[in-house]
Image (tube, rainbow, N blue to C red):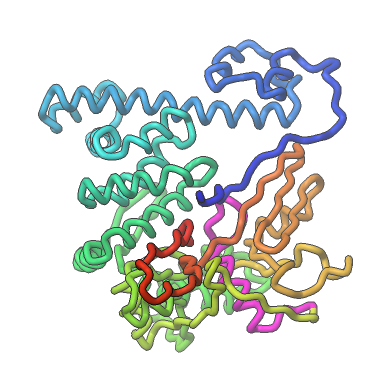
Amino acid sequence: MSEPPFNGEYESSDGDRGSEGVPEAEDAFLDGQCAPEDVLRLGGVEWTEFEADALVEVAKLSQRLIGRVQAVQLKAVAELRKRRGNARETADEVGLALAVGRHQADRQIELATQITRRFPRLLAALERGDVDASKAEKVVETGVLLSDEHADQLDADMEPILNGRDGAAIQRSARYRVDKLDPDGAAERVRRSRENRKLELHFTENGMADLCAYLPADTAAAIYGRIDAIAKSDKTRRDERSLDAIRADVLTELLLGKRHSYKQVQIQVTVPVTTLLGARELPGDLEGYGPIPADIAREMAADPCCTWRRILTDPPTGQLLEMGRKRYKPPAQLGDYVRARDQRCLVPGCNRPSRRCDTDHSIEWRYQGTTDAKLLVCLCRRHHRLKDRPGWSFEFNDDTLTITTPTGRKYRPRTPRIAEPEPEHEPPEQGAEPTEPPDPGPPPF
């Protein structure tokens, strides 16, 4: 059993559109007769004659071609590194050849070395065009400190869930598996990273600068949450500043002592009860961040500054149990439930935490839509507004959001599981040989 692609599946439009007047090249793309390399032959076509659906297909095939070419490039770089035996000298030459800086050349060589030596399945996915190099790098970076045995297991676990997913979703899946494969090592790496916390100042153009703080994720989330809450309370219709500008001003006023505020925020840490009790080492989840090692999750759950919520799940599926209401405005408990279930905006590629999303009626209230968990879905404000644009359709049913675009393509992201499925099974009869526990299926991320 493999985890379904988070970004959903694609279906072509079923509209009655004849081929009369449509260029031959466009027909080929719409009929699925073209391979990724065929996009290279389109340099002389008249793009204005292509319909929107054909343009989307060209873009999709082009992305697959990019991944395949990047696989060739990484294999060439890895072979060069192997022959030279000197990473610094190789980086100098690769940097010159690709016209990139030393740091970027070093990253290219590290990715090439790791993916060719320890992640053969990931390399194969790159060769097929299922992912590009930036997505592959998310897996390699997450598993770079694993032993060869654990890296091979990570490679195998990630293979069936790469195609069609965005980089952030791939990184969350990889992080979850790394924390589960090597819980002790994951916790130690988190502690070492915390020791390297720092504050940096980088001057930029036009009299501006970046003030960057490298902090533990829970601390950074709490700081941002507090600033965001103050900024939103300051925002008025007459205020011409953007919300981003107000956040920056609030941060400045707080740090320079020009403002005092007692507004507090709470961050949510979701911990499986078996992890909380120490019976298992399943990763927890930090709202807006994703998987965290079991040890760190237990520490956060015990921290009085954090809010952790016991969430009831259906053991065979790992999904939240259903709740229903009959009012238009979701009551607090139902809203908490929907936000905990969805974790973030359900539109693929959007990673805005559910706490900062709207809980939207899939079927509008005025069209007899009911206010219950089966019809409510978390959408960020941008995608909430997008669903009302001409040609767009968002339909939520049980655990799947069906997004139909103006070209007629359909994408079906599903709500993520928030706990690992733990199917119930009958205990063995007396005198019988113990049996292996059933496969729990894919993990929640």
In the rendered image, residue 340 lying in the magenta stretch gets the answer yes
Residue 334, how many percent across, how many down? 66, 79
**Closer to us: 230 or 362:** 362
Residue found 13% across the figure and 27% down from its top: 89
* Residue 224: x %, y % from top left: 44, 71
Determine which quarter of the picture holds residue 214.
Answer: bottom left
Outermost residue to the front: 431
The residue depicted at 36 percent of the width and 46 percent of the height is 139
Tell me what residue is drawn at x 70 percent, y 60 percent: 384
Q: What range of the chain is rendered magenta?
A: 328-354
In this rendered view, identify the residue nearer to me: 15 or 323. 323
Q: Is residue 100 magenta?
A: no
Left or right: 428 as drawn, with respect to 58: left
Give whichever of 195, 208 is nearer the camera: 195
Q: Quick check: can you spot residue 311?
A: yes
How many tags in the picture? 0
Tell me if residue 244 comes above or below residue 53 in the rendering.
below
